[in-house]
Amino acid sequence: MFARPSPLAFALALALPTAASAQGFEYAPTTAQYRLTSTTKGAQEAMGQKQEFESSHSQLLSITVARPSKDTVAMTAVIDSVTAVGPMGMVPPGLDRLPGIKVSAKLSPFGAVYSSEGPKDTTIANLLQITDEMGRFLPRIRGKLTAGSSWTDTTTGKVKQNGIDIDRQVVAKYTVVGDTTISGEKTWKITRETTTSLSGSGAPQGQPMTMEGMSNGKGTLFMSQKGVFVGSTSEDQANIKITLAANGMEIGVTTTANTKVEKVK
């Protein structure tokens, strides 16, 4: 339900007031609220039958960033409100229990996640996936923010999605295409191209299965020259294959997800 952005997507900021110079970007202490909206269109195909679907969601997030030490950023993310429409036009079950959920994360000054912790309520569907993505709300900005600079960043790790344990690798290329002004604030404009590969297995609802796939994404990040995440847009296209262990049946899923993050205050 929550897009990253990353497949599945979150961001804010922490650093000294003069961060985001040629010395390298750092997030600055701040408190802000963001609106994240996403729409996903796709199709599922199995045994020669194809079914198209569409879903959407919108949420407000309050993000607080502090700098407890030179090498550590402390971020808290709270869901203020959320609305969603599932693939069948229905409201996902348990949606009303998400507002108020809080995640605390420790990050590097440029946004790499050291650790994150959220609620442990196992009765909320996909809560582990949701809290993991909330902990990764801030984009990783490893490069120096000067016009024309570029860099590549690779992240690997394990995530849990719909009851399946997944190994995921994301290779992202960033390019600083220039600067602009948003709400009177000087802001760097950074393009991002990502390639994600994933594979894993699990037994959601007691049904053993494997999953593998690829996705490609393009987007733009806006980072203020004071060290604050201003917003982003992205489009991710994914191609996933799920194989049921019981009978070997293969299910193909293709999706296109468009996500927008806006700093609202």
Image (cartoon, rainbow, N blue to C red):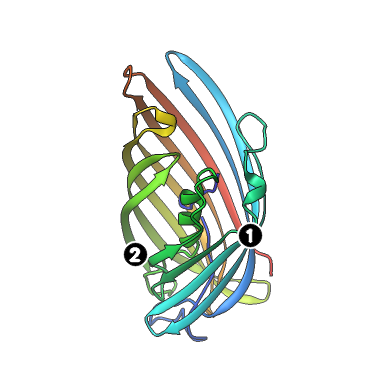
Placement of 17 over or under 181, stated as above or below = below
- Residue type indicated by callout 2: Trp
Q: Nearer the viewer, mark 1 or mark 2?
A: 1
Judge by depth and name the residue closer to the eye, 212 or 262: 212
Of labels 1 and 2, earlier in sequence is: 1
Q: What is the residue that sits farthest to the top in this orientation?
A: 48
Q: Residue sitting at 65 percent across and 67 percent down?
A: 33
Q: Tell me the residue that label 2 is attached to.
A: 151
Q: Residue drawn 52% across and 73% down? A: 13
Q: Is residue 223 left or right of residue 143?
A: right
In the picture, measured across the screen, residue 71 lies left or right of residue 89, that is: left
Left or right of residue 142: residue 264: right
Residue 7 image label: none
Query: What residue sits 39% from the left and 66% below the top?
Result: 115
Front residue of this view, candidates 133 and 219: 133
Where the N terminus falls, by quadrant?
top right
Q: Position of residue 243 (x, y in %)?
A: 34, 25
Q: Is residue 5 left or right of residue 246?
A: right
Residue 25 visible in the current orientation:
no
Q: Quadrant of residue 54?
A: top right
Q: CA distance from mark 1 to mark 2?
A: 37 Å
Count residues near mark 2 (Cα–Cα under 10 Å), then give few for <14, some for 14-19, many for 20+: some
The residue labelled by disc 1 is: 100
Name the amino acid, label 1.
Answer: Gly
Total number of numbered discs in the rendering: 2
Q: From the viewer's perspective, is residue 45 above or below residue 212?
A: above
